[in-house]
Image: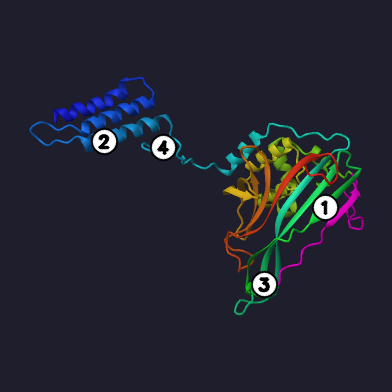
Amino acid sequence: MRELDDALDQLHHDVRTADVPLDAVRARVLAAAADSTGRKRRGGTWWLAPVAVAAAVALITGVVTTGNRNAPAAGTSPDAPVNVEPLSAREYLTKAADAITAVDQPLAPGQYRFVAVHGWYSHSVVTGDPVGAPEQPGGYTYLVESRSGTWIPQDVTEEWATQRMSPGGVKWLGGTVPQSEAPVPEPDASGERRGRCGLFFPESQPKKVCADLEDRDDPEFYTRLPRDPQALLQWLRESTTQGGGEPAAVFHWALQLLSTGLVPADLRASLYRALALLDGVTVADGAADLDGRVGVAVTVEDVHERRELVVDPATGDFIGERTVTGPQPHKSYLAPGTVTGYSSITTKVVDGIGRTG
């Protein structure tokens, strides 16, 4: 047994006394273990392999995890994926805010801010009460694809332009009738509209006011909002008094602002920080994919339906928004977790109406 004690003592002695890189420690321990597996005690059958290898594995694991708790386990490839504890919604939002270091490109005369939206929106039809469940109206739901683009000039009192089109994409979500009995919805009208100050529908009421600081579709709207996160959160609450200033109402209002594609970089960072202070904000999906742009989806949970803000925490980019059914969907024929709509939003500076890049 003395030989066993000496071997184990020597095995630990290297790590306790030597000031060497971890790779060197690992190599020495493995070499000692390999050497031990080939030795027999003369006159007996003492094999050191089980004990020495177990001690080596324990020692290597201890050395690696002591230096870095997220390092790969012993015996795995250095390139193997590492399991990292996911961040909370507050941490993701704060990280996204910290990542916003650039300022928005200013518009020169003749240039436009171009906001492109690619979305899928739910189209539902009520067909009547299903047999035996009059409290749950029957019907069916499709997702319908849509694209739009809006050009906003440097001088917002000049002419704007917007184009809308229906690419024709349709996805069946479900219903109380077979899909074969559910007519596919007609595509929305496509076309272009122009108007000074973004007045695309002159007959609409209430009539749009040029350069109205209460109009969130006007870039000037965002110049007066506070940048301090606490003050901004208070403004969001005061702006949603009809919803009681509840976290869900505040979250939805902030998401509406971000979805315009007009929130400047500094205010976007402040909005992220303000939402990080909101009670109930949580991570819904750590890898939400909107048109190939992957980000973290954060939300305020709702039993029926939740709206998600999708953000890239590495860049601070607002990718878009998504709507998903909750544990008890409004439409009983839709399963919980069904995506009932999403939009991917990008903003660029272009040199004229009709240009997209």
Q: Range of the magenta residues?
A: 182-210
Query: x and y percent of residue 43 in the render?
Result: 7, 33
Q: Is residue 197 left or right of residue 261?
A: right
- Gap in angstroms between the C-alphas marked 1 and 3: 31 Å
Foreground: disc 4 or disc 3: 4
Mark 4, residue position: 77
Reading the image, the residue beneath label 3 is 139
Q: Is residue 56 visible in the rendered structure shown here?
A: yes
Q: Residue at x 9, y 35 (%)?
A: 44
Dominant secondary-structure state across the stretch colored magenta: loop
User: Label 4 is placed on what type of residue?
Assistant: Ser
Q: Position of residue 300 (x, y in %)?
A: 62, 51
Name, please, the residue furthest toward the bottom. 131
User: Marks 2 and 3, Cα distance to the nearest angstrom?
Assistant: 65 Å
For mark 2, does the 10 Å Cα neighbourhood hold few (<14), some (14 to 19), or many (20 or more) residues?
some
Identified by mark 1, the residue type is: Gln
SS of the residue at dot 1?
Answer: strand
Question: Looking at the picture, which amino acid does disc 2 mark?
Answer: Val
Which residue is under mark 1?
163
Mark 2 sits on what residue? 53
Residue 355 lies, in percent from the top left, at 82, 44
